[in-house]
Image (cartoon, rainbow, N blue to C red):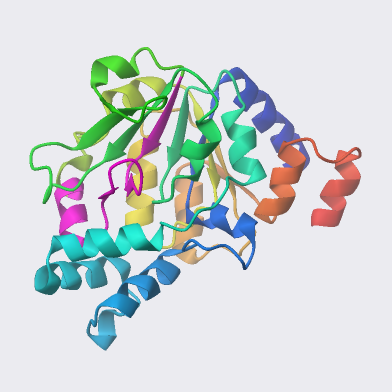
Amino acid sequence: MTLEAIGTIKDGLARGLVIPYMGPGVLALAGESCPLPRSPVELVDRLTAKASVPHKIRKNLTAAAQFIENFKHRKTVVAAMTDAFAAPMQPTPLHRFLAAQFALPLIVHAWYDDLPQKALAGKGGWGMVQGVSQSQHYGTWVHYFSGETLAPAGQADAAGWRTLLYQPLGSVAPAANYLVSDSDFVEVLTEIDIQTPIPEAVINIRKNRNFLFLGCRFSTQLERIFAHQITKRSSDRHWAVLPETPTRNEARFLAQHNIERIPLPLAAFSGLLAGGADEPNQAFAAAV
């Protein structure tokens, strides 16, 4: 059944009917030598290495960022985030495969690195929309950027882009915009149920489309809320590559949203998706 799902997903990506939704776990494809934080835990370790925070919140990314913001200023948070994602790194084969899908209208990237941007760099007719912090851009939920020039753009420009890269949490590039502290998310969550922070272009594109979750977990309420609200009013069938045994909350979320779990390591799934194996059935058997 999983092998059949992979075929359906691959066909859907080629036809622009399946939308990739990438989380921090995609960076694990780069292995232990990856210079960028591959999870919220790795990221909060980077932040707390530069600023002392109370022990009880040292492993809580949003709370630690809020403490630093309160006592060291927002600029300190932005500088620490930018430093955490400043190391040069090339896109993984999965990033490049997704970027090469000509008909793909939307890519959701729920982490702070710029690897999808680098993968799309050689592709014309694309742009970005990124979430921005109300503490820095009060009254504005998102900023648009041209993919070809990285210059600021507008909502009207997005209508002409063949592929839209949506980064709901912001990104290190091109303008170091981040949603990371408790207050950042409180502002967004206050409005997200009525979809105010979700770009109109995303709302229009997602209709009747399936989502493919890659490198994502749904173990925290914040992860589940963003996944739910971004995929709202899309289709009634989705997939998640999730080799780990789901937690109780994750299993409930998968069932509620009709998300089929693909229990493969992301590297194995990526290889099968890209058609790297001459004998898919043998490759699938080896992966599981």
Left or right, 250 with respect to 176, comes to right
The extreme left residue here reads: 138
Left or right, 215 with respect to 188, comes to right
Looking at the picture, tell me which residue is in the foreground, 75 or 239: 75
Left or right, 163 with respect to 8, comes to left
Picture coordinates of residue 22, whole percent (x, y): 50, 45
192 over 10 or under it: above or below: below
Q: Would residue 1 be seen by someone viewing this image from the given angle?
A: no
Q: Give the quarter of the image for residue 16.
A: top right
Marks counted in the figure total 0
Which residue is at a point 34% across and 79% down the rendered structure image?
Answer: 49
Q: Would residue 274 be seen by someone viewing this image from the given angle?
A: yes
Looking at the picture, tell me which residue is in the foreground, 43 or 2: 43
> In what quadrant of the picture does the C terminus appear?
bottom right
Looking at the picture, tell me which residue is in the foreground, 37 or 4: 37
Which residue is at a point 46% across and 37% down the rendered structure image?
Answer: 117
Residue 87 belongs to the span the image colors magenta = no
95 over 249 or under it: above or below: above
Picture coordinates of residue 82, whole percent (x, y): 33, 57
> In what quadrant of the picture does the N terminus appear?
top right
Looking at the picture, tell me which residue is in the foreground, 286 or 121: 121
The extreme top residue here reads: 160
Which residue is at a point 31% across and 68% down the rendered structure image?
Answer: 61
Picture coordinates of residue 24, whole percent (x, y): 48, 55
Which residue is at a point 64% across and 34% down the rendered structure image?
Answer: 97
Residue 178 belongs to the span the image colors magenta = yes
Which range of residues does the magenta coloring cover? 163-189
Left or right, 135 with respect to 251, comes to left
Picture coordinates of residue 195, whole percent (x, y): 23, 34
